Image: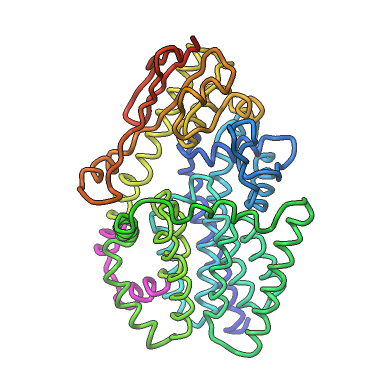
Amino acid sequence: MTPTSNSVLQDRHLFCLLTAGFVLFYAVQVPLATSSADVVAFALRSNAPKPIFAYAYLDARTLQDATPLPNYHLAHTVALWVTYKCFPAWLRQTAAPAGFFSALCGGLVVGLSYLIWLRSGWTKKEAVAAAGVVGFVPSFWYHSLIGEVYLPQIFGVILCVALFLYSRPILAGMALSFAALISPLAVFCFPLLFLAGWSNKRLGNALVVGVVTLVGYAGCHWAIGSNPLGFLQGTDDLAVGKSLLFRLLSLGGIIVLNLHFLLVPLAAGWRTCWRRGKTALVALSAVVGLHLLLPVLSADFLLDKGCFLLPVFWAVSLPLGVGIARSGLGRWSTLGLMLVTVLIMETVWLLPAQRSAKLRSEAGSWLRGRFGQEIKVMGDWGTALPIAAEVSGWEYESVATHFYDVDYPSTGNFFATGEDSLLVAIGRKPTLRRWASRIPLPGFRVSDYVPEVPPGAGNLEQVFTNNSFTVYLWSAP
């Protein structure tokens, strides 16, 4: 065996080791319960007899005077529907299959990242460090467990980049089309195709990728009769949200929570990358800049403490890996960084999510025992849907007919259901958000919504409360 073939074999072994290691690492942490209403909706939809393409979450029966969002997660819908069919019935009634799918995508991103940095001219030590770093970034780690759309999307992007660097532009375009069919924001990562530099051949291949992506994206929407630009329906209120100052401070907090003491090797690695690979740094900077604009435009892009910033954390993993590889962090320094990361991960991401999921599960079980499965639930999406799923028994048709998605329900909404009684679930602001509300600046003040019933409009009785939400029973007069 020649030295070259032996090196290729070693690279494949390292790719398999990184991928399998991180898939296993994530998979053993996947929770059965979830606090994410979106993941609850994905799980319910994935148990349907066939994939649901007509809308993104739940159908119009759950809305009052509103139109369901079009489905701009088509590829995720199909992939998750197939994934759920591979699990036993008792697991299909949980969010776990969605989490296992995210774990698989997360592990593959780590492995493919190693191949990408190696193919782009960085040393094996730097490539391993950069791939390992992205796998342990708290936002990336968290979203590799919970079953949201963000990890499958970035997996499609990273697969596209890897195939492009290995001169497979048609397959790369298909991969980017897959990512865009999960979220059209994937096209913001197009500059990553030029990580290894510019040339006429690469420009031609990039054009092929763009055409294949466009044809694949538009073709899939055309095949099911949907609007390829339907995702723009959710951007009508893009400027609505918290104040710009609040968004900038939140963005800074998310970055510090994810990178914390790694900001020091990041600065050193950035300087090294500038000396050795300006083209790669320009491509990464373009992706970082495009994605950092999103939270500035709308507070919606600050959801889940960094979900829309995953491409940013992937992009900075190269200078981070280079900085760590060059600085030669000692055993104790590496152990200290890992302990800090695990502490932040547990206290900021995992424990609050697990506690919230447990509270909703317990509340749903208690409410089902007291009021039965037939009672309907109204309230904001994030609070009421997980409770409705527990009350109704995790079956799509039952939830779709027993849940009303209303952010700030009032008596008009109650009477519009035609019910004699229903449960009203109202979320409470997180503790940290309530503390921030004390800051006397525009956009910081918030208060918990408390529904009121005027005389003659029925009776509203508080039946359940905890630190996360309150549930009322409304009864018609």
Residue lying at 48% horizontally and 85% vertically, measured from the top left: 279
Task: Name the residue: 67% across, 73% down.
Answer: 210
Left or right? Give the position of 74 relative to 128: right
Please give the name of the residue rendered at 74% of the width and 39% of the height, measured from the top-left corner.
Answer: 50
Colour scheme of this structure image? rainbow
Q: Where residue 43 appears, x then y in whole percent? A: 60, 38
Outermost residue toward the top in this view: 477
Q: Is residue 156 above or below residue 441?
A: below
Tell me if residue 401 comes above or below residue 312 in the rendering: above
Provide residue 116's location: percent of width, then percent of height.
Answer: 54, 73
**Residue 276: where, in percent of width, then height?**
41, 87
Asked whether 415 falls inside the magenta stretch, the response is: no
Total numbered badges shown on the rendered structure = 0
Is 361 located above or below residue 174 in the figure?
A: above
Seen in the image, is 172 located left or right of residue 30? right
Helix, strand or loop for the magenta stretch, by majority: helix
Is 351 on the left-hand or right-hand side of 61?
A: left
Q: Which stretch is magenta?
A: 318-338
Image position, residue 139 (x, y; %): 41, 54
Quarter-wise, where is residue 249 in the image? bottom left
- Say which residue appears at 66% left-offset and 47% top-offset: 77
Q: Residue furthest front?
A: 455
Residue 320 covered by magenta stretch: yes
Outermost right residue? 223
Vertical comparison of 62 with 461: above or below = below
